[in-house]
Image (spheres, grey):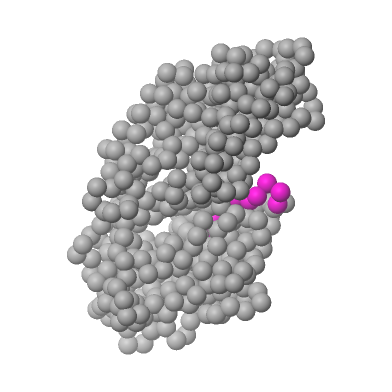
Amino acid sequence: MTIKDLNPAIVWNNFYGITRIPRPSKHEEKIRAYLLDWAKDHGIEAFPDDTGNVIMRVPATPGYENRKGVILQGHMDMVPQKNSDVKHDFLTDPIETKIEGDWIKACGTTLGADDGLGVALALSVAESKDVPHGPIEILVTYDEETGMTGAQALKPGVLKGDILINLDSETEGELYVGCAGGVDASAEGTYETVKAPAGYKTYNFAVKGCQGGHSGMDIILYRANANKVATRILLEALKSEDLKLVCLEGGTLRNAIPRECFATLLVKDEASAKAVICKLAEVLKSEYAETDPDMQVVFEPAAAQAAECITDADALRIVRAILACPDGVERMSASVAGLCETSTNMAMVKVADGKWFVKSLLRSSVDTAKMALAEKMKAVFDLAGATTTFDGAYSGWKPNPNSAILKVMKEVYERKFGEEPKVMAIHAGLECGILSGAYPHWDMVSCGPTLLSPHSPDERCYIPSVSKIWDYLKDVLANIPE
């Protein structure tokens, strides 16, 4: 069985088409063209806005012309993450999928169900001939994963509807009515190097096999950050051993918890250094045994000798700064049980060619708390002699307890499935908060099928949830008020 054999066939076939198109963030030209061609082939009005979002318009079915207009919204880009042993070019290669029981996964890469399935659901509404609905607009934004650029660029007046249903949340049975805001933090500094001393051999050091995951949704799981694990080991090794740091690099995207971190070292006494590193590795593997059972620490001879290394003082300064940089859950919500209020993901580090940087993504449902965390981070890097900048800030989405569309969606869910849906706020950056800036009158709710481990190669979708959300979405659209 393949993805094309699954039901509902209309949704899975549309998702299959999307998986064939390369679409990493900031490289959406192919998926944009695909969506416009798809609309043309299906006789649906579609156009790109002035910035690159794709908008489609679907007339009301007969008898539903007087219903409020609904915007179905998702994003066209995906997070490009893969396991290090997988050969895949996200700019040219399609996503290959496989079915494991009730789950669909990709073959060593992210699946792109975030938010390819949301877009597929919207396209399926437009394509279907048996879904009663009022006027529908489909908004597919670009660059959601690395800056929400498309949402921020959307101009007022382009869309006509009154209700927005965002299809980018990740647990079926939950309706989201609020989300965290965020800001990107970047710290940069320099260091001095010296010629590699005589008698030292070059070694590769790595932390691998961490689970990683979505830096908003999964931060509450307290998974290992490979950058933190690596620098914790390196600090002790640098302090206690005759060992030199040549370079260091870990993490690839701000919104993905780092799974791997790599360093090159100069080592004088292999046995002694190995003993220290292995001892600390065992301690850390024990600490993270529940969240990251497959974590590995590698220490092995390198194929080539390094010609220079970082000075001892600078190596310690940089490693200490990375280790001290805030990461993980900062504060849980005092008003919503189980909700993370404020967090940060120390996503990327690189120390090479005389320069070093650390890049993080800070999130909070409280703007003042988010910026207080930013100042805390800046204080760490000020002490380390680095320059810190912040950009791409966006506010969260404040819940509306009087939402009319929320009332409809709750009633429909309870009638169809015999239980109430959970009404939630999410510690991730949905586009709803940004979109409401251009369209403050929109009544908004977010929903979607069940996904696990988005933003990592372990991303998977629970197949039965797709059928359930499809049936639910059709019923909601049939019950939109006049």
Please give left or right for residue 281 compared with residue 181 in the image. right
**Front residue of this view, candidates 55 and 166:** 166
Which residue is painted at 70% across and 52% down in the image? 86
Which residue is painted at 72% across and 24% down in the image? 271
Is 406 within the magenta? no
Asked whether residue 172 appears in the rendered view, the answer is yes
Asked whether residue 435 appears in the rendered view, the answer is no
* Residue 393 coordinates in the image, percent (x, y): 37, 40
Name the magenta segment's main secondary structure: loop
Is 82 within the magenta? yes
In the displayed structure, 356 sits above or below 297; it is above
Quadrant (top left/top right/bottom left/bottom right) for the N terminus = bottom right
Which residue is painted at 39% across and 51% down in the image? 428
Quadrant (top left/top right/bottom left/bottom right) for the C terminus = bottom left
**Front residue of this view, candidates 271 and 10:** 271
* Residue 464 coordinates in the image, percent (x, y): 50, 75
In the displayed structure, 374 sits above or below 22; it is above
Q: Quadrant of residue 2?
A: bottom right
Which residue is painted at 34% across and 48% down in the image? 340
**Front residue of this view, candidates 102 and 345:** 102
Please give left or right for residue 445 compared with residue 206 in the image. left
**Front residue of this view, candidates 229 and 96:** 229
Please give left or right for residue 409 compared with residue 401 in the image. right
In the displayed structure, 60 sits above or below 49; it is below
Q: Magenta residues?
A: 76-86
* Residue 364 coordinates in the image, percent (x, y): 33, 44
Figure label count: 0
